[in-house]
Image (cartoon, rainbow, N blue to C red):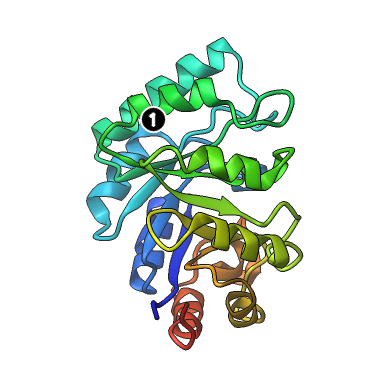
């Protein structure tokens, strides 16, 4: 049996410090949390990597209009990956779909190429895919994609629990981790893990002051959530 790991969203350097002090296993570094997360500044990436002794995964998302990107967006995405790598980030967080709701395999191949030497999380764009399980099979072809952040195609992970269990089963025991995100907190995290078997949990508003994404990370909430994870295993 393996313990469940905790990834915490950080939008500032103080968030990074607070999440780390609370025992987070990994940071997802973003800006614009209210919009679901966009690419943070180069300075913040560099400072976060220098300050953290846990892995920092950097969001690569140029805008919040959709997960369908044009040629100009692709140029921005490539340059942002290069800068995240230059800053020393361990991994990137990325996702892209075609207008038909399929994984954008052409752009994904370019992202994998540009991110060579880094790990990749494919983010919740997958929750808007026309076929979740088909999308997962495409992602499994790329060794550098180590994680898939998803709520099982629903608004919250709790609502998508049945699909999350299926994704965990389809991901297999080695290599690809399903990371459950959206609506996860101390009130439901243990039951969700028992129901789905997810090896990673992704926390945003639930580990912030007042439970609000607009506020900073609360070290005590991170510690509390990590303690609850320590009581269950997969």
Q: Which sits in the foreground, 90 or 210?
A: 90
Q: Is residue 215 visible?
A: no
Image: 34 above or below 207: above
Residue 106 image offset from top left, x and y in percent: 51, 20
Residue in front for this viewpoint, 11 or 99: 99
Name the side, left or right, on which 29 lies relative to 187: left
Q: Which residue is mark 1?
A: 112
**Residue 191 quadrant:** bottom right
Q: Residue 163 falls in which quadrant of the image?
A: bottom right
- Residue 67 appears in view: yes
User: Farthest bottom residue?
Assistant: 231
Name above or below for residue 221 compared with residue 53: below
Residue at figure coordinates x 55%, y 18% from the top left: 73
At 66% from the left edge and 31% from the top edge, which residue is drawn? Answer: 102
The answer to which of 44 and 28 lies nearer the viewer is 28
Q: Helix or strand or loop: what does disc 1 sit on? A: helix
Q: Residue at x 43, y 53 (%)?
A: 176
Query: In the image, residue 192 lies at what x, y percent?
Result: 63, 75
Q: Residue furthest top?
A: 71
User: Which class describes the residues within 10 Å of circle 1: few (<14), some (14-19), or many (20+)?
Assistant: some
Where, quadrant-wise, is the N terminus in this rendering? Answer: bottom left
Q: Is 140 left, or right, of 189 in this rendering?
A: left
Q: In the image, residue 23 lies at what x, y percent? A: 36, 73
User: How many numbered discs?
Assistant: 1
**Image point (56%, 56%), residue name:** 170
Nearest the eye: 126 or 163? 163
Where residue 198 sits: x, y (%)?
Answer: 53, 68
């Amino acid at each position: 049996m393996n313990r469940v790991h905790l990834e915490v969203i950080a939008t500032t350097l103080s968030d990074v410090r607070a999440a780390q002090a609370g025992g987070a296993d990994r940071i997802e570094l973003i800006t614009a949390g209210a919009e679901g997360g966009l690419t943070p500044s180069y300075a913040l990436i560099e400072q976060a990597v220098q300050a953290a002794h846990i892995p920092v995964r950097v969001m690569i998302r140029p805008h919040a209009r959709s997960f369908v990107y044009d040629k100009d967006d692709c140029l921005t995405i490539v340059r942002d990956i290069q800068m995240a790598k230059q800053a020393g980030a361990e991994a990137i967080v990325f996702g892209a779909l075609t207008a038909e709701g399929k994984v954008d395999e052409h752009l994904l191949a370019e992202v994998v190429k540009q991110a060579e030497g880094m790990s990749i999380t494919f983010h919740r764009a997958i929750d808007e895919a026309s076929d979740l399980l088909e999308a997962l099979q495409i992602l499994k072809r790329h060794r550098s994609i180590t994680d898939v952040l998803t709520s099982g195609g629903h608004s919250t992970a709790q609502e998508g629990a049945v699909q999350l269990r299926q994704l965990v089963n389809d991901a297999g025991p080695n290599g690809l981790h399903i990371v459950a995100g959206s609506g996860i907190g101390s009130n439901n995290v243990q039951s969700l893990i028992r129901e789905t078997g997810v090896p990673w949990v992704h926390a945003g508003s639930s580990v912030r002051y007042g439970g609000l994404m607009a506020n900073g990370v609360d070290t005590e909430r991170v510690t509390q959530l990590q303690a609850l994870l320590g009581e269950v295993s997969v």
